[in-house]
Image (cartoon, grey):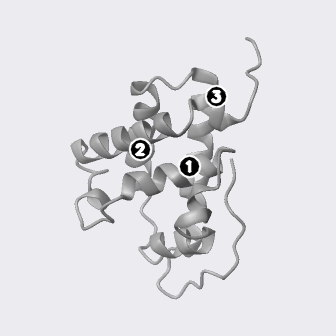
Amino acid sequence: MEKQAGSLYEQVGGFDRILELTRRWHELSLENPVAAHPFEHEMHPQHDERLAAYLAEALGGPKLYTGGYGDETSVQRLHAYNGVHVELDEACLTMFDQALSDVGIPDAAALRVAAYFRRATEDQRKWSRSDALVPDGLPFNLA
């Protein structure tokens, strides 16, 4: 297998492909009775675009998220204090992996993105308790 040049962001196909990925993940999650839960409630109207900006930056692309939406602390605080929900996480991760395939992310890049997304999802569990304190100034979670 040939080594791919460029950042993971470039290997994935850039922002438009990442936005396609986030939209497909959202669609798939709504179709899954377990994964649908967080998507069935009021979400930011540009959730998919914001997630795409976050992923673009995490994968080595432009600083779209920190340049316009917030920092790692704000992301963690958005997702914190909801308890540990492994079954939900696993369903969402399965839908994310399916979305990677559906939008045609190359296999080597898809494996790396999937591993990153799993790690990021599991890392959020440290802020799951209602008394958890998400500190200011967390470093951006890069792939």
Q: Position of residue 26 (x, y in %)?
A: 32, 46
Residue at image point 46% right, 23% down: 104
Mark 2 secondary-structure assignment: helix
Compared to 42, does 36 lie above or below? above
Mark 2 and mark 3 in contact? Answer it, CB < 8 Å.
Answer: no
Mark 3 secondary-structure assignment: helix
Compared to 101, does 113 lie above or below? below
The answer to whether residue 94 is visible is no
Instruction: Tell me the residue that label 2 is attached to.
Output: 22
Inspect the image, locate mark 2, and give the three-letter code of the amino acid beneath it: Thr
Instruction: Tell me the residue that label 1 is attached to.
Output: 55
- Taking depth in this image into account, of 37 and 54 the one nearest to the observer is 54
Instruction: Tell me the residue that label 3 is attached to.
Output: 11
Compared to 84, does 120 lie above or below? above
Q: Position of residue 117 (x, y in %)?
A: 56, 47
Q: Position of residue 106 (x, y in %)?
A: 56, 22
Residue at image point 64% right, 24% down: 108
Residue at image point 38% right, 51% down: 48
